[in-house]
Amino acid sequence: MKRLDAANDNEVGRQIARTREIWQPRMGRNLTGEDARQILHNATGFFGVLAEWRRTELLTAANDCATPVEPNDGEVRHDR
């Protein structure tokens, strides 16, 4: 049976290799494994922040009480 941490190491290694494959031509230079790891870390962090902002926006919109909700209990109001 494969060790769990070894499986994770293999996946991280594949992600770093893929990051090098994608970014090296765009950077115009050879990237080290550390360069690729930093790019992967920064991109993951960036999209994590975007996701957090989106969740916050959705929660804020769901809890927005700026506009009062008119009651609709079936009674007619004549005081307007």
Image (tube, rainbow, N blue to C red):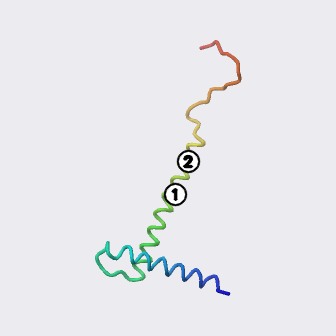
On the picture, is 19 further left or further right than 66? left
Which residue does the image show at 48% across and 66% down from the upper left? Answer: 45
Q: Which residue is mark 2?
A: 58
- C-alpha span from label 2 to label 1: 11 Å
Which residue does the image show at 62% across and 26% down from the upper left? Answer: 70
Q: Nearer the viewer, residue 64 or 43?
A: 43
Of the numbered discs in the image, which one, if any, rests on residue 4? none
Q: Is residue 19 above or below residue 69?
A: below
Q: Is residue 59 above or below residue 32?
A: above
On the picture, is 4 further left or further right than 45? right
The residue lying furthest to the top in this view is 78
Q: Which residue is mark 1?
A: 51
Which residue does the image show at 53% across and 48% down from the upper left? Answer: 57
Q: Is residue 50 above or below residue 73?
A: below
Residue type marked 1: Ala
Residue 67: image quadrant is top right
Q: Nearer the viewer, residue 63 or 7?
A: 7
